[in-house]
Image (spheres, rainbow, N blue to C red):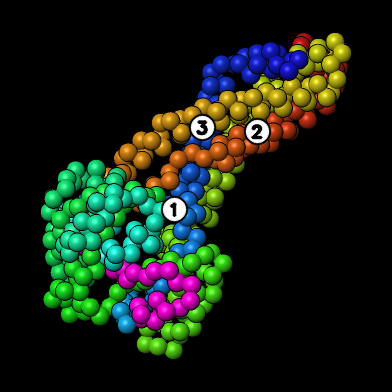
């Protein structure tokens, strides 16, 4: 801190050049914070770890195939299973095909869904009781209900796609959970319809196990039970089930990390060029400082400090812009589209903040290392000779 004022003065000696260089760091750090936060949001567990003892049973070949409802009773009999519900993705069209009207639509068993399986979610007991008693009733995530302006008693029609049925449902009330992008209605609404597969199949089974230690045993027991049947199963933890949707989009993590490394390399070169130009312009000044008693270590420290300070200033502004401007704007804008499901946890975490500042320091050190070494090795005679 003894020479901070000197370092600060040198950083802003050429204000325009420093401003342009810092702006490039701001842009890069803003982009990195956004990409890293998006990756964290896509990988995050909406339940916050409260779903560690929940399992999802799907067809071994993927979600595109149904499972027979006859498997329900056998799964319920496995020791350690607290409750099971068949769950079917309806996939209907609400209003039209516009992304902002996309909603997750799932049929389930209301008798056990919030009471025994998703007991970490919050729902008014009166709403839950009325939902159980209303065969064509549905509950919706609080955020999606607000988005569409649904009021109690409102009717919505979901136009069937791969299930040839138009579902006419009535809104009962909201629930609050980590993921509020879905609506839930009765399995019996489908089971009592004229759909050819009604009361025969389901998309998957959601179940809760008594404790986390029993999860591997129960998962293995389910898959072994049906491994030689016409509908073999693949049992996943809730976290694994959620991550497979991300995997369907390819190696997103590799793509984001690759983009981040490329732009970091580019901005490091930009900062290095700025620091090198500044050092070359001050050759005589550095020689005079050496004459006055400043050692090679002082010069090395000054140049490196200038590079790190410039990077930190740009990084700080980049983090502020990402956290308080761009990410809230992205969440607000994307909330009207089908990708809103990925933005449930889209925010700047403490780990991302720490990473951003570490990256800023790293860029400064890498960019300033060679110019600092060259300046510290400058001979006094060579530096003074350039005055003439």
Provide the secondary structure element on which disc 1 rests: loop
**Mark 3 Cα shell of 10 Å, populated few (<14), some (14-19), many (≥20):** many
Q: Residue at the location (67% across, 23% down)?
A: 306
Residue 297 percent location from the top left of the image = 83, 24
Q: In this view, does 245 lie above or below 34?
A: below
Magenta-highlighted residues: 71-93
* Quadrant occupied by the N terminus: top right
Closer mark to the observer between disc 1 and disc 3: 1
Residue at the disc numbered 3:
319
Q: Which of marks 1 and 3 is nearer the N terminus?
A: 1
Residue 353 percent location from the top left of the image = 56, 36
Residues at marks 2 and 3 touching, judged by CB atoms closer than 8 Å: no
Residue at the disc numbered 2:
361
Foreground residue among 30 and 123: 123
Residue 165 percent location from the top left of the image = 15, 69
Whether 82 is among the magenta residues is: yes
Residue 331 percent location from the top left of the image = 36, 40
Mark 1 and mark 3: Cα distance apart in space: 27 Å
Residue at the disc numbered 1:
47
Question: Within the image, what quadrant is residue 329 found in?
Answer: top left
Left or right of 287? Residue 66 is left
Q: In this view, does 243 lie above or below 374?
A: below
* Quadrant occupied by the C terminus: top right
Q: Earlier in the sequence, mark 2 or mark 1?
A: 1
Question: Within the image, what quadrant is residue 117 found in?
Answer: bottom left
Foreground residue among 346 and 184: 184
Q: Residue at the location (43% across, 69% down)?
A: 82
Q: Residue at the location (26% across, 65% down)?
A: 107
Whether 22 is among the magenta residues is: no
């Amino acid at each position: 801190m003894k020479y901070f004022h000197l370092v600060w003065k040198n950083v802003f000696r050429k204000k325009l050049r420093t401003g342009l260089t810092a702006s490039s760091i701001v842009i890069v750090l803003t982009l990195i914070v956004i990409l890293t936060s998006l990756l964290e949001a896509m990988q995050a567990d909406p339940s916050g770890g409260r779903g560690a003892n929940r399992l999802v049973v799907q067809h071994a070949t993927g979600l595109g195939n149904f499972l027979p409802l006859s498997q329900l009773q056998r799964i319920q009999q496995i020791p350690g299973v607290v409750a099971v519900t068949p769950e079917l993705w309806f996939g209907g069209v609400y209003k039209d095909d516009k992304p902002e009207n996309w909603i997750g639509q799932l049929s389930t068993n209301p008798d056990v869904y919030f009471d025994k399986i998703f007991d970490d979610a919050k729902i008014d007991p009166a709403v839950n009781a009325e939902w159980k008693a209303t065969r064509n009733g549905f509950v919706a995530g609080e955020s999606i209900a607000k988005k569409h302006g649904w009021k109690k008693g409102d009717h919505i029609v979901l136009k069937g796609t791969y299930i040839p049925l138009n579902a006419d449902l009535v809104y009962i009330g909201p629930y609050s959970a980590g993921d509020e992008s879905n609506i839930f209605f009765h399995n019996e609404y489908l089971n009592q319809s004229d759909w050819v597969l009604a009361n025969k199949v389901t998309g998957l089974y959601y179940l809760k196990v008594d404790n986390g230690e029993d999860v591997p045993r129960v998962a293995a027991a389910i898959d072994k039970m049906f491994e030689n049947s016409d509908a073999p199963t693949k049992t996943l933890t809730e976290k694994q089930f959620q991550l497979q949707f991300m995997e369907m989009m390819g190696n997103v993590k590799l793509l984001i990390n690759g983009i981040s490394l490329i732009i970091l390399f580019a901005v490091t070169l930009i900062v290095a060029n700025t620091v090198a130009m500044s050092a070359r312009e001050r050759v005589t000044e550095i020689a005079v400082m050496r004459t006055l008693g400043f050692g090679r270590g002082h010069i090395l420290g000054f140049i490196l400090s200038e590079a790190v300070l410039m990077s930190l200033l740009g990084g700080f502004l980049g983090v502020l812009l990402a956290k308080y401007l761009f990410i809230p704007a992205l969440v607000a804008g994307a909330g009207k589209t089908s990708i809103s499901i990925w933005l449930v946890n889209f925010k700047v975490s403490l780990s991302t903040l720490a990473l951003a500042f570490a990256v800023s320091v790293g860029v400064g050190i890498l960019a300033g290392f060679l110019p600092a070494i060259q300046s510290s090795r400058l001979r006094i005679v060579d530096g003074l000779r350039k005055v003439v």
